[in-house]
Image (cartoon, rainbow, N blue to C red):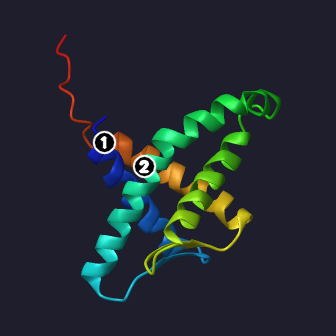
Amino acid sequence: MSFLIKVLINGIALWLTSLWITGVDFRTDGTTLNTVIVIAAVALLFTIVNAIVKPLVKLVSILFYILTLGLFFLVVNALMLLLTSWLTGFTDYGLTVDGFWTAVLAGLIITIIAVILTLVLPDGRKKESR
């Protein structure tokens, strides 16, 4: 799947999550253009964090994945969301998440939305004809 498609999917998932869950918000100046730019920047950062940091965390915590039968996946998603929120906290614009349990719920919703959008959006590869 193309990197830009992943950024688009993450952007839509983050935006919808911020609409549905109180405690997950974007810091913007209120204009539509600025909101779109902030969501795009946060989605890009979230995609990069998921591409670089998440595999390392999964490798280190493989025992927890096995012991919890995969439920540790929710904790890792929450940590990636909190890391993105922390990284954007150094700017005037970005993402705010109000705590760990909010991040767990948001991570679950982001994952569900991303799976649905991955099924709907094309991935940039040609379909093989049989």
The image quadrant of residue 105 is bottom right
Q: Secondary structure at mark 1?
A: helix
Q: How far apart are the alpha carbons under marks 2 and 1?
A: 8 Å
User: Which percent across, then down, holds residue 109?
Assistant: 56, 57
* Residue positioned most to the right: 67
Does residue 27 appear left or right of residue 66 in this picture? left
Numbered label attached to residue 80: none
User: Label 2 crowding class (10 Å Cα cut-off): few <14, some 14-19, many 20+?
Assistant: many
Q: Is residue 127 above or below residue 81?
A: above
Q: Is residue 80 above or below residue 123?
A: below
User: Which percent across, then down, holds residue 50?
Assistant: 50, 45
Check disc 1 and give the amino acid type.
Phe
- Report the residue marked by disc 2: 47
Q: Residue at x 70, y 49 (%)?
A: 75
Check disc 2 and give the amino acid type.
Thr
Q: Is residue 93 above or below residue 62?
A: below
Quadrant holding the N terminus: top left
Given residues 104 and 129, the one toward you in this image is 104
- Report the residue marked by disc 1: 3
Q: Residue at x 67, y 57 (%)?
A: 104
Q: Residue at x 68, y 67 (%)?
A: 102
Confirm or deny contact between disc 2 and disc 1 (CB under 8 A).
yes
Given residues 8 and 55, the one toward you in this image is 55
* Residue positioned most to the top: 130
User: Which percent across, then down, holds residue 67?
Assistant: 82, 30
User: Which percent across, then down, holds residue 10?
Assistant: 41, 54
Does residue 6 appear left or right of residue 20 in this picture? left
* Residue positioned most to the front: 90
Q: Residue at x 30, y 80 (%)?
A: 34
Q: Earlier in the sequence, mark 2 or mark 1?
A: 1
